[in-house]
Image (cartoon, rainbow, N blue to C red):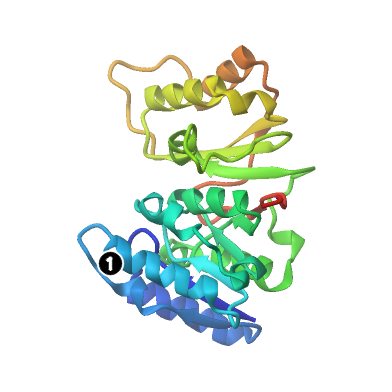
Amino acid sequence: MRIAVVAPSCALSATAAERVGAILAARGDAELLIHPQCFARDGHFAGDDGARLGALREVMADPAVDAVWFARGGYGSNRIAKAALADLPDAARAKTYMGYSDAGFLLAGLHKAGLAVAHGPMVHDVLRDGGEAAVGRALDWLVKRDRAALEPALDGPAMAFNLTVLSALLGTPLEPDLTGVELLIEEIAEHLYRIDRMMFHLVSSPGAQTIRRVRLGRVSEVPANDPAWNGDVEAIVRDWCERARIPYGGPADIGHDVANRVVPFPLAAS
């Protein structure tokens, strides 16, 4: 199996690339192709929009590539997502695409176009304490479709998104079809009032009325509210789900951490 790595948002460090390359070499069950664009720099981004789009389109069109693994999050994939989906080459439809966080923009668009996508750990996660386990989990799914890598409580069609990314997707051409879907959400480094505002936006959107249920992944590094917020993240999510009469299904094993599990999106017709 050949797995291509591109960076549609921020640049990948050479250290992360070397560590994941060593993991693949020890496993011996796949070949890792890290596109040179991953190391490009253009301010915040891994190269300018044209470079990031060109690298993504290149690996999408390569019939020798079986999976596209996004290098890391940050911000930037939304700037190239619509262009990446234009006139999809046939080879693009035979691959699996994996990432999370900012990569959610691409996951949403690719899924809407009928391609196979999954929320799951990325290359950069190897730099977290214990990150080898996260990388191994992602590879177990990409290479072997090992169900042990999946979020354990999945019981039907599901999607997983960072809440900030999902909120930004709503009302755009990339907005995912949430009909009958178990929606798993997670967040990092956002104030509670912002999470409350994003939940209002989510449950108020027309597409949210068809969600099967919402489950809450880990919400980490929450800055202190000033003035203090009354309640916690789960109370916020429960409240907005109740207001919208969307079932709340409890916790989900996803987040910006090494325990992040894989959530394959349901296959969709293009």
Pick the residue in front: 11 or 186. 11
Above or below — where is 18 with respect to 261? Answer: below
Name the element at disc 1: loop
**Location of residue 110 by image quarter:** bottom right
Q: Please name the residue shown 72% across and 72% down the image.
A: 144
Q: Please name the residue shown 70% across and 37% down the image.
A: 181
Above or below — where is 36 with respect to 270? Answer: below
Horizontal arrangement in the rendering, residue 1 relative to residue 85 (left or right): right
Give the percent coordinates (x, y) of residue 90: 62, 70
Above or below — where is 35 with respect to 205? Answer: below
Figure disc tally: 1
Q: Quadrant of the N terminus?
A: bottom right
Give the percent coordinates (x, y) of residue 83: 43, 57
Can residue 11 be seen here? The reply is no
Q: Please name the residue shown 53% across and 81% down the image.
A: 32
Residue indicated by mark 1: 47
Pick the residue in front: 75 or 255. 75
Above or below — where is 165 with respect to 76? Answer: above
Can residue 58 be seen here? The reply is yes
Pick the residue in front: 225 or 58. 58
